[in-house]
């Protein structure tokens, strides 16, 4: 257990429905990352936050995806109008950003199946 | 794009050392080498990282060549639970490049 908590761990939803995932990072970690991983592939970067500011978004993050970190603590990733291609594991990670070669810690992921 | 090259797979016998190679010939002076592993259906697990010097912790050792163009992760006594996908990643620490960019990794199979 790295201390990064993700909920729910598994979600099955019908195509067209909205889903939301929550991530609670390690306390005092100021950076929070979201990744997506499909079967047989490495994790792909989606977005990251420094405190409450969203500093970078991948082109993979279509306009149906939105991520927030309103108070600089937990974060949510919402997918609107889900499609079957959204089926994947969504990973959250956090780190304490400094100059010293810090470490990014991942949660166990949230599996999404769109039927 | 990932800046590292790893063989797709390798195996080793339980109890023996597993030496996982990684090429990163275009690494810059301010880029660290990180290793993570991912056991099936779990999140990536941090193993070790280094800049220039060799590093060792309770999980593994990281050997970085003097020119920093390649490195080797060493699991000194592999167990069946070390069977996983291992990712070698180079990472800068400035604001723009702080994320990890994963490639396909190397699948290590530890056989009894």
Image: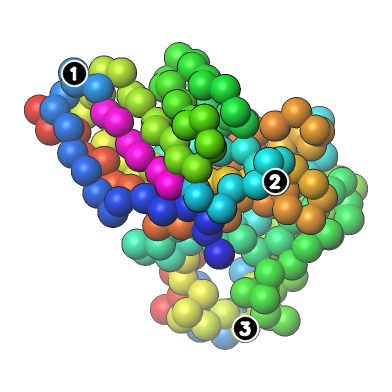
| Element type at mark 2 | loop
The residue lying at 68 percent from left, 69 percent from top is A58
User: Residue extending furthest left?
Assistant: B112
Identify the residue position indicated by label 1 in the image.
B15
Q: Which mark is residue B92?
A: 2
- Where are the magenta residues, as a range? B18-23
Q: Position of residue A52 (x, y in %)?
A: 88, 51
Q: Is B38 or B86 nearer to us in this picture?
A: B86
The answer to whether residue A83 is left or right of residue A80 is left
Q: Is B43 or A19 nearer to us in this picture?
A: B43
Q: Position of residue A44 (x, y in %)?
A: 55, 62
Q: Which mark is residue A81?
A: 3
Q: Is residue B61 above or below residue A114?
A: above
The answer to whether mark 1 and mark 3 are in CB contact below 8 A is no
Q: Measure the alpha-carbon separation of dots 1 and 3.
A: 50 Å
Chain ID for label 3?
Answer: A
In magenta segment, residue B21:
yes
Q: Is residue A17 above or below residue A58?
A: below
The residue lying at 49 percent from left, 16 percent from top is B57
């Amino acid at each position: 257990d790295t201390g990064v908590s993700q909920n729910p761990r598994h979600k099955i939803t019908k195509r067209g429905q909205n889903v939301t995932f929550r991530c609670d990072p390690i306390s005092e970690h100021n950076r929070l990352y979201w990744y997506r991983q499909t079967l047989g592939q490495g994790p792909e970067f989606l977005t990251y936050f420094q405190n409450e500011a969203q500093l970078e978004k991948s082109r993979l993050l279509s306009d149906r995806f939105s991520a927030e970190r309103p108070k600089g603590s937990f974060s949510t990733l919402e997918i609107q109008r889900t499609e079957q291609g959204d089926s994947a594991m969504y990973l959250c990670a956090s780190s304490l950003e400094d100059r010293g070669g810090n470490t990014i810690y991942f949660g166990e992921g949230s599996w999404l199946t769109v039927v | 794009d990932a800046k590292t090259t790893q063989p797709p797979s390798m195996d080793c016998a339980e109890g023996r050392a597993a030496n996982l190679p990684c090429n990163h010939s275009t690494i810059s002076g301010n880029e660290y080498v990180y290793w993570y592993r991912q056991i099936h259906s779990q999140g990536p697990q941090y193993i070790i990282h280094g800049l220039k010097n060799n590093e060792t912790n309770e999980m593994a050792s990281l050997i970085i060549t003097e020119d920093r163009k390649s490195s080797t992760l060493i699991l000194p006594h592999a167990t069946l639970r070390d069977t996983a996908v291992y990712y070698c990643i180079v990472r800068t620490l400035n604001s723009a490049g702080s994320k990890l960019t994963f490639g396909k990794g190397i699948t290590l199979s530890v056989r009894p």
